Image (spheres, rainbow, N blue to C red):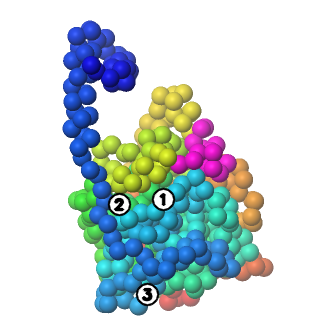
């Protein structure tokens, strides 16, 4: 006797595809589905266990930068030997609770993320996980279920969603930290806190063991006090990993190749739309930074990126559709995804939705409703606009070695100042476009402005796999200060 649930699922599937089934077909398909399900039940999905972190404890620091402190020693030698690092709360560390900044999740991984493994293999000592906006879906730290993070480098917010990583580096609590970036979540806190933030070429850093926000936009990368450290950490974690099929076939950039490279003869385009959209003191600081690059031997010219002003909206539309679908499917991403582990999917499926913060609740309901109302047409339109902008950036980088622009149009805003969607879109106005295109983007602090001495970040964007040129230009800005 075939289970009624299977029969109902067969009928629903046929309706989805507009098929009319005969009674014989219905019984035949249901029997086949039941037999296949029985075979699949014999599979035992599991992620490889890892040695768990020791001395795991809830953290307490004056900036609320850390969520948990722990002890996990890396290899005795390697490019990161002697360096203490932290990772964002959406990156798996065996034995350390992973909450994605949410009170709704209860998950303790028994495995490391790919990047965690690589940090340890390179000699780094892992000392904790850092606070973040809930599910990485904001840019100030104010949506974190564990309380907001304070900015050691300015009076305003530290930026997000990698707020704890930015604050921990700025305060000198760690030598470097990993963040994640969907619309600017590495570079925004780097800009607001006055540290370096490096978004790599899309898919060159594997995302196994990381909780995606939007699979076609997400990047994992470092925040550090200087360009050299950021480049060294990035080089240690990049390269394909079979557990993340989206990374397979990607080239391995060599960011550290740019550390001693002269910038004489490089051509740099100063993005006019970004300069015009920035606050006056931010635009002026970035123009002075561009002048320093020119003084160091680069040729700097104004350049236009048609369509640039609409890309933050495109980024938001893509993020909403992909995030709401991921949560609705308990983190399942069919096809070339990022290799979710079964335990993590179970945690998402079983999370207490009533404990979600207001920001995520609203974005889940509204985003899902909009996607359903137009049957995904808005997402398709956003992807089409995205592809057109990718061509614009590719064309410019065929003529210039790099693009330069403010990382954010403003310095760190006050708590509560980013409250409307228009405000949120402005925070990602200069960063979100390059999540859409996948180009590497390096944020370097170049000035402090205003009475409070607020940091200003300058963003350097280069061609795919050409992190080394961004590093060379970033180092030139550091040396020229």
Reading the image, the residue beneath label 2 is: 208
Dot 2: element: loop
Point out the tag, 3 or 1, that comes first from the N-terminus: 3
Point out the tag, 3 or 2, that comes first from the N-terminus: 3
Dot 3: element: loop
- The label on residue 107 is 1
Q: Is residue 359 inside the magenta stretch?
A: yes
Q: Can residue 205 be seen in this view?
A: no
Q: Residue furthest front?
A: 1
Q: Nearer the viewer, residue 354 or 323?
A: 354
Residue 106 percent location from the top left of the image: 52, 57
Q: Give the range drawn in magenta.
A: 351-366
Q: Nearer the viewer, residue 455 or 34?
A: 34
Residue 477 percent location from the top left of the image: 51, 83
> Distance of mark 3 from mark 1, alpha carbons?
27 Å
Report the residue at 46% width, 52% height from top.
347
Q: Tell us which disc is closer to us: 3 or 1.
A: 1
> Distance of mark 3 from mark 2, alpha carbons?
23 Å
């Amino acid at each position: 006797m075939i289970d009624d649930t299977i029969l109902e699922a067969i009928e629903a599937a046929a309706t989805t595809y507009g098929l009319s089934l005969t009674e014989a077909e219905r019984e035949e398909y249901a029997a086949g589905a039941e037999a296949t399900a029985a075979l699949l039940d014999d599979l035992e999905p599991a992620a490889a266990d890892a040695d768990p972190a020791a001395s795991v404890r809830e953290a307490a620091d004056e900036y609320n930068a850390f969520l948990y402190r722990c002890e996990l020693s890396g290899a005795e030698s390697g490019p990161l030997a002697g360096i203490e690092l932290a990772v964002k709360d959406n990156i798996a560390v065996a034995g350390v609770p992973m909450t994605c900044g949410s009170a709704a999740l209860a998950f303790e991984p028994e495995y490391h993320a790919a990047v965690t493994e690589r940090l340890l293999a390179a000699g780094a000592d892992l000392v904790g996980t850092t606070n973040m906006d809930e599910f990485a879906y904001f840019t100030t730290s104010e949506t974190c279920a564990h309380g907001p993070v304070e900015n050691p480098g300015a009076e305003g917010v530290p930026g997000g969603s990698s707020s704890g990583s930015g604050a921990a580096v700025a305060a000198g609590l760690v030598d470097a930290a990993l963040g994640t970036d969907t619309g600017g979540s590495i570079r925004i806190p780097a800009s607001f806190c006055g540290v370096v933030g490096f978004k790599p070429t899309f898919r060159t850093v594997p995302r196994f063991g990381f909780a995606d926000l939007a699979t076609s936009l997400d990047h994992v990368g470092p925040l550090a006090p200087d360009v050299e450290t950021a480049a060294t950490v990035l080089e240690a974690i990049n390269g394909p990993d079979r557990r993340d099929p989206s990374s397979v076939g990607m080239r391995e950039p060599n960011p550290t190749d740019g550390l001693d490279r002269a910038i004489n003869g490089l051509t740099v385009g100063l993005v006019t739309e970004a300069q015009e959209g920035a606050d006056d003191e931010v635009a002026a600081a970035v123009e002075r930074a561009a002048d320093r690059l020119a003084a160091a031997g680069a040729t700097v010219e104004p350049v236009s990126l048609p369509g640039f002003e609409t890309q933050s909206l495109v980024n938001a539309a893509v993020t909403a559709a992909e995030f709401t679908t991921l949560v609705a499917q308990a983190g399942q991403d069919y096809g070339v995804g990022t290799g979710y582990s079964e335990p993590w999917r179970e945690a998402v499926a079983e999370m207490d939705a009533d404990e979600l913060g207001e920001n995520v609740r609203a974005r889940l309901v509204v985003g899902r409703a909009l996607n359903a109302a137009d049957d995904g047409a808005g997402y398709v339109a956003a992807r089409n606009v995205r592809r057109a902008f990718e061509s614009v950036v590719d064309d410019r980088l065929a003529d210039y070695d790099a693009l330069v622009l403010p990382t954010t149009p403003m310095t760190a805003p006050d708590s509560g100042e980013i409250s409307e969607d228009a405000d949120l879109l402005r925070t990602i106005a200069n960063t979100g476009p390059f999540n859409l295109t996948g180009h590497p983007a390096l944020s370097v602090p170049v000035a402090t402005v205003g009475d409070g001495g607020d940091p200003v970040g300058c963003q350097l964007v280069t061609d795919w796999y050409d992190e080394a040129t961004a590093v060379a230009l970033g180092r030139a800005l550091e040396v020229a200060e």
